[in-house]
Image (cartoon, helix red, strand yellow):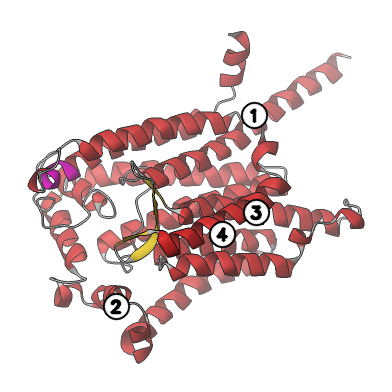
Amino acid sequence: MKTLRKKMSFFDYYLFIPYLLLSIIGTVMVYSASSISQLYLGGGFDSYLLKQLLFTVLGVIVFFIVSYLNQRIWANIMVVEFGYVVLIGLLIYALVFGTAVNGAKGWINLGAFSIQPAELCKVYIAIYVAWFCGMRQKIVNQDIIPTKINFLTRPYILALMMIIMLGLILKAPDTGGFLINFMILFMILLAASNSLKIVLGGLVGLPIAYSILLIILAKTKLGTLMPGYAYGRILSFFDPFKYATETGKQVVNSYYAISNGGLLGQGIGNSIQKRGYLPEAHTDFILAIISEELGAIGVTVVLVLLCWIIMRIFLIGIRSKTIFNALFCYGIGTFFLIETLLNVGAVCGLVPVTGVTLPFISYGGSSMLVLSAALGMVVNISIKQKRKLEFDVLEKKRKKSS
């Protein structure tokens, strides 16, 4: 009991409490957003609630397990090598035999639930690229014997592996998953450059390039080369009301939900748009239902909690003394940040709809478990930092006393 109490004294409650609050809010709102539509379809009104509750409980268990797991178990060459083979196998299997959801064939149906390999790739890329950059630094510093340099530390191998993985995700096509995974890779490599100019240039240049690409796809014949539903989403992004009965339906009804909510909302359970008007109300567009039922105040609470978690992850990365820990935290922080921006942007009509969920809020088992595991890994790093800090303080006291 004393050992457990000692371990819990290092626990990062600044991450756990917001995570728990978001998970509770998400479970309640999934129930609110899905119950009516399930009754309309003749199903059980609480079916999504029970599943999301199960995912949340499993997520918390995974979170705690990973938080106290020895880092050497998941941050080593074996995970990098074996994990890549497994993920590529899952991505290929999903493409060939997987279940299509909203036009993207990226799901593997396991009966009671489905898994999305692209979700697992987000954590894997953060681990591999952080490990790669850490090893490259050791090679530069000549901390590694040349004969023990692994082929996975070679830049062209990294490029080849990432092109294959990202290419398979895009092939699904899973645009949202591709963007998030690409940004994790991009931001870790930027951070590893140790150049403020390169980092700032990348942060400014990438959104501009993305905006130009959207305009080109929408205004030229290049967009017609895309899958029909994806091209439709880009067209409806520029004029959602023109396609209000087609690809713009979600965005238009999201606007109505936000407008209905006002400052205080209509009250939980009283959304109009979830009654068959807003498709996928419990997944991609759950924030619109939160806005309609809990108002701008409810949305603000959710976004503040998410912003707190994201900033805390980046702060832990900044405080880290090792390259791997720092870059891994930057990767996971980017994962949470881009996923939040893509979801909120789609709900508000600021970016095209990509089918990205809102972290810890939207319905989904793969998303909840991967997010929980990723956050648990960050807490693992935070615990090590606190232990190291206490050890340093005690060591200083011991030296003074002697």
30, above or below 68, in the image = below
- The type of residue carrying mark 2 is Gly
Q: Which residue is mark 4?
A: 88
Q: Which residue is mark 1?
A: 386
- The type of residue carrying mark 4 is Ile
Q: Which residue is mark 2?
A: 228
Inter-mark Cα distance, 4 to 2: 26 Å
Which element type, helix, strand or loop, lies under badge 3?
helix
| Residue bounds of the magenta highlight | 34-38
Q: Which residue is mark 3?
A: 128
Q: Which of the two discs, 4 and 3, sits closer to the camera?
A: 4
Q: Position of residue 342 (x, y in %)?
A: 37, 60
Q: Which of the two discs, 4 and 2, sits closer to the camera?
A: 4
Which element type, helix, strand or loop, lies under badge 4?
helix
Q: Position of residue 337 (x, y in %)?
A: 45, 54
Residue 353 found in image quarter: bottom left
What numbered label is drawn on residue 110?
none
Which element type, helix, strand or loop, lies under badge 2?
helix
Mark before the other along the chain sequence, 1 or 2: 2
- The type of residue carrying mark 3 is Tyr
Q: Which of the two discs, 1 and 4, sits closer to the camera?
A: 4
Q: Residue at x 78, y 58 (%)?
A: 136
Q: Position of residue 183 (x, y in %)?
A: 52, 62
